Amino acid sequence: MGWYLAARGAEVLKRLGARDVVSFASGKPPTNLVAGASRFGSDPQTTVLDADCRAHDVENLYVTDGSFMPDAGNAPVTWTIYANAFQAADRIIDRLGGPRGSAG
């Protein structure tokens, strides 16, 4: 999964005009369990993001790292972050009117 994400990220950067893009991945999940900085929920007074991890106050800002979770506890959250990022990508595609699954 890491190599796939690294390759896709590099491809996106190149399509946007970036040069000298280098991508890599590690077989190990990160050792830090960062979470909780941008909690999600329905109340803009107490949360930063809606249920789709879109910022309440910035229409085109989605947060796709671990900060949407209240706490990582003592369990690795890497796969949850990946799943959330793909879900957010689907929401962005829907909002832009594009077809899902066309990226490969």
Image (cartoon, rainbow, N blue to C red):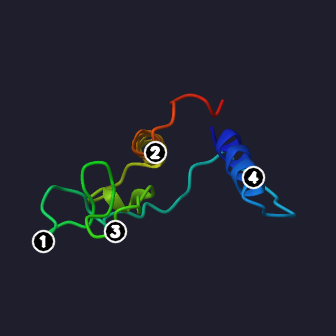
- Quarter of the C terminus within the rendering: top right
Q: Which residue is mark 1?
A: 45
- Closer to the camera in the image, 63 or 101: 101
Looking at the rendered image, the disc whose residue lies closer to the viewer, 3 or 2, is 2
Residue 3, compared with residue 15, is above or below; it is above
Residue 87 circle label:
none
Residue 15 circle label:
4
Dot 4 falls on a residue whose secondary structure is helix
The x and y percentages for residue 2 are 65, 43
State the separation of the CA atoms marked 1 and 2.
Answer: 27 Å
Q: Which residue is mark 2?
A: 96
Circle 2: residue type: Leu
Circle 3: residue type: Val
State the separation of the CA atoms marked 3 and 1.
Answer: 14 Å
Circle 4: residue type: Arg
Looking at the rendered image, the disc whose residue lies closer to the viewer, 2 or 4, is 2
Identify the residue at image location x=75%, y=52%.
15
Circle 1: residue type: Gln
- Relative to 30, 12 lies left or right: right
For mark 1, does the 10 Å Cα neighbourhood hold few (<14), some (14 to 19), or many (20 or more) residues?
Answer: few
Q: Which residue is mark 3?
A: 58
Residue 72, compared with residue 3, is above or below; it is below
For mark 2, does the 10 Å Cα neighbourhood hold few (<14), some (14 to 19), or many (20 or more) residues?
Answer: few
State the separation of the CA atoms marked 2 and 4.
Answer: 18 Å
- Relative to 85, 70 lies left or right: left
- Closer to the camera in the image, 4 or 93: 93
The x and y percentages for residue 101 are 56, 28
Dot 2 falls on a residue whose secondary structure is helix
Q: Which of the marked residues, 3 or 2, is nearer the chain's N terminus?
A: 3
Q: Which of the marked residues, 3 or 4, is nearer the chain's N terminus?
A: 4
Identify the residue at image location x=69%, y=44%.
8
